[in-house]
Amino acid sequence: MSNIPEDLHYAATHEWVKVDENGIATVGVSDHAQEALGDIVFVELPEPGAEIEARAEVAVVESVKAASDLYSPASGEITEVNEALIDNPQLVNSAPYDDGWIYRMTITDERDLNELLSAEAYADHCVDE
Amino acid sequence: MGQRTSLHDRHVAAGAKMVDFAGWDMPLHYGSQIGEHHQVRRDAGVFDVSHMTVIDVRGGDAAGWLRYLLANDVARLEAPGKAQYSLLLNHRGGVVDDLIVYRVAAGYRLVTNCATRRKVLIWLARNSPGYNVQVEERSHVAMLAVHGPNSITLACGALPGDCAGEVRQLGNFGALEHEGWLVARTGYTGELGIEVMLPGESAGELWGKLLAGGVKPVGLGARDTLRLEAGMNLYGQDMDENTSPLAANLGWAVSWRDQDREFIGREAVQRQRESREQDGGAVLAGLVLEARGVLRNGQQVQTDQGAGVITSGSFSPTLKQSIALARIPWGSQSCQVELRGAMAPLKIVKPGFVRFGKRIFE
């Protein structure tokens, strides 16, 4: 059974989001997703400063097995990307909720977060899939 | 639930992610495919390859039959204790399967692919009338492959004591029999190593001793990236019944040494050779992607001589870049592939990227 922290929001497409006290959201892929992908060998990061729409392709995670698009869980502006992933993409495997985060963004409309799943709902979603 | 090898419970106990492979429950990895890949390149790993099909051939016509059936010539196996890579061809000169044939005291042993098992058994049966041969599948034989720079040293510590000395003396493609076991210097990784065929009921004990001695279990995921780095073909991807061995970098496995030898596919491959003198035909080449990204099976590539297709593409953990085998027009000098909307250049090399832990192309 994969690890699904209680305090995060999840997209059905397996991204997680954590919003800090300043309204900055950190986005990554879930433990379930990294496990299904297998060893990750490249992460194509977005450009800081880019404006993105909710549910638009924002990054690509390539594993030994397949390339997988990452969809932005909310609309907003990219503020920071995890450059450690350029040399060490396997951080996504080893620490998907921590050192393996992918990018940070401001959120234009907080209502986007209401569209996301709770940990419990996401766990059900992973079982059903 | 699929078929299980005699080591199934040990895989689960070692934390394997089990997947279906041609009807078998097999370990894909035990945590990290890339970690297991490096383990084989740098130290020693063990693969359970008991899903492979093991077929014994006995009888007075065994040699003559195999000289007719196989593209390589078993007459080159001068004595028991020798092995050879070979092909089963059809009459159109396509590849029915690739295999290793071992000459053993009682006759010959063939190790063919798992996914082709039924087809191969039918092919052998269909082509045996008129020959005094007994063809018998050995489904209770387990097979462990131990590979890596330290594999022989570590494996010898786990093998029955009275055969370890002889195993150390084996040359490449050498084999020895020991009380129902067959130990051979063959493999699919481009590293030093042995394959051990033994009764299924003995496999657990050998597995346990190997792991206790420091050999780590390696799954099918790393087996695929290791063989791709070594430039070795995978049946069903890099060649099949519609592929000439000449278009699959396998011309070396068709023996023309005895000009009088009749073998299935001979005339067709002869014709393929003649027509290739005219137009070159397609070749199986190695490709290296210098940019970030991963080449994938089935992707189209463009060369200066026309279109080609990637037959096996993946990420090379040793080189930390993507490599592939691709069927491209003969004489291609340059090659590119579309990656996320842009064309990326590919370096064309001979198939074979890594040997004994080191990069082998310029």
Image (cartoon, rainbow, N blue to C red):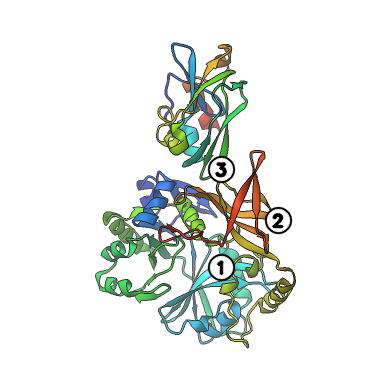
Q: Which residue is mark 2?
A: B304
Would you call the spot at circle 2 few (<14 residues within 10 Å), some (14-19), or many (20 or more)?
few
Sequence-wise, which precedes: disc 3 or disc 2? 3
* Above or below for B285 versus B294: below
* Above or below for B327 versus B80: above
Across and down, in percent, residue A57 comes to: 61, 29
Sequence-wise, which precedes: disc 2 or disc 1? 1
Element type at mark 3: loop
Q: Amino acid at mark 3?
A: Gly
Element type at mark 2: loop
Q: How many marks?
A: 3
Element type at mark 1: strand
Q: Which residue is mark 3?
A: B293
Distance from the alpha carbon under mark 2 to that under mark 1: 31 Å
Quadrant of the snapshot with the C terminus of chain A: top right
Across and down, in percent, residue B311 comes to: 61, 55
Distance from the alpha carbon under mark 1 to that under mark 3: 31 Å
Across and down, in percent, residue B207 comes to: 33, 58
Tell me if B150 is positioned left or right of A26 in this view: left
Q: Evaluate whether residue A116 shows in this view.
A: no
Q: Which residue is mark 1?
A: B98
Q: Evaluate whether residue B13 shows in this view.
A: yes
Residue drawn at point x = 60 percent, y = 51 percent? B346
Residue drawn at point x = 30 percent, y = 75 percent? B166
Across and down, in percent, residue B54 comes to: 48, 68
